[in-house]
Amino acid sequence: MGSSQAWKNRTAVISGGSAGLGKALALRLAQEAANLVIIGRDPDRLKDVQEQALKLGACSVCSLSVDARKLVDGLPESETLRDVLAVQGCDLLINAVGKSDRGFIEQLTQEDLVSQFELNVLTSHAMTKFCWSALCQSRGVVVNIASLAGIVPGPGMGGYSMAKHALVGLHRQWRLESQSSGVHFLLVAPGPIARDDSADRYAELVKARQLDPNSQNPGGGVSLHRIDPVELSRQILRAAQERKPELIVPGKVRMLAMLMAIWPSLADKIIRKKMKRS
Ligand SMILES: NC(=O)c1ccc[n+]([C@@H]2O[C@H](COP(=O)([O-])OP(=O)(O)OC[C@H]3O[C@@H](n4cnc5c(N)ncnc54)[C@H](OP(=O)(O)O)[C@@H]3O)[C@@H](O)[C@H]2O)c1
């Protein structure tokens, strides 16, 4: 499917834009001739996505090697990002930093929970605050990448479901509080995304915590179709352009979230069946 030019010459800041879904979004925006600011830690991965984006037609690409957990006033990395935003502005912020987990709640330490919270929630808060004045000037869009595990629980997914539920709370509160700013908030809650390394991504954790080997698969082994990241990127950018409030993929999970509110025991039963756990 051909790309639209909705983001042509506009500036998109993508935290976690050097791999996975963030990278797919960056490359899609490159095809639309956007200006890109890509944030990640590994400089080699950043260089690789920068080169690919320029080849695909990005108007400009700036890559910043920054730990998004350390975006605090006064730190050199934070000042570099501020300088870039002052020149480039920001029409679209995509908070894609985040990572899933594996384990049962009783196995987790407080450090495990704090680490999940830092990566999946606080990075989004810090990035949005850093881009806020630029976003207000452009009446731009903030896209928070949550997960289905942020709207319904994912048993055996360690601290991930807690963290993504907190991200959804952060997102919805910010959306309510900022109506007069003109900044739009889009929440994205996807199911498991197809990727090449999915077979061994959580293998060590699953072994160390003696979990069912099936739980190392995307989505903790949930029986849901794997989403194509390129198609998902197209849907996300379209929803951002159309200023939709939420994108849940697959959409039928919205019904499960409603059921969780009105009939929790039935919702639990359905989730256990989908996760193939007792
Ligand atoms: N994969 C799935 O099946 C799935 C499903 C639903 C939702 N999601 C959500 O989608 C988002 C992307 O997931 P993914 O699996 O595609 O991710 P991924 O492949 O692991 O990529 C994560 C990106 O974030 C960057 N990153 C990680 N920690 C960072 C930090 N502290 N500071 C700056 N950058 C950091 C990584 O680069 P460096 O490591 O070089 O820093 C990389 O660019 C996440 O929020 C995830 O929870 C994923």
Image (tube, rainbow, N blue to C red):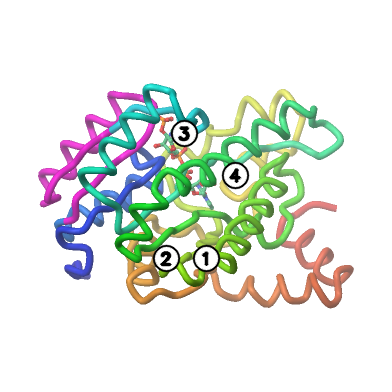
Q: Alpha-carbon neighbours of circle 3 within 10 Å: few (<14), some, or many (≥20)?
A: many
Q: Amino acid at mark 3?
A: Ala
Q: Is mark 3 within 8 Å of ligand 1?
A: yes
Distance of mark 4 from mark 2, alpha carbons? 19 Å
According to the picture, the residue beneath numbered tag 3 turns out to be 68
Q: Amino acid at mark 2?
A: Val
Q: Is 204 colored magenta in this rendering?
A: no
Vertical side of 214 occupied by 33: above or below: below
Q: Is mark 4 within 8 Å of ligand 1?
A: no
Distance of mark 1 from mark 2, alpha carbons? 7 Å
N-term mark: 2 or 3: 3
Vertical side of 52 occupied by 57: above or below: below
Q: Amino acid at mark 1?
A: Ser
Q: Is 61 colored magenta in this rendering?
A: yes
* Image x and y of residue 142, in percent: 43, 59
N-term mark: 4 or 2: 4
Residue 121 is tagged as: 4
Residue 183 is tagged as: 2
Q: Tags 4 and 2 in contact by the CB under 8 Å rule?
A: no
Q: Is residue 114 left or right of residue 56?
A: right
Q: Which range of residues does the magenta coloring cover?
A: 34-63
Q: Secondary structure at mark 1?
A: loop
Q: Tags 1 and 2 in contact by the CB under 8 Å rule?
A: yes
According to the picture, the residue beneath numbered tag 1 turns out to be 178
Distance of mark 1 from mark 3, alpha carbons? 23 Å
Q: Secondary structure at mark 2?
A: loop
- Along the viewing direction, whichever of 32 and 101 lies nearer the viewer: 32
- Along the viewing direction, whichever of 87 and 148 lies nearer the viewer: 87
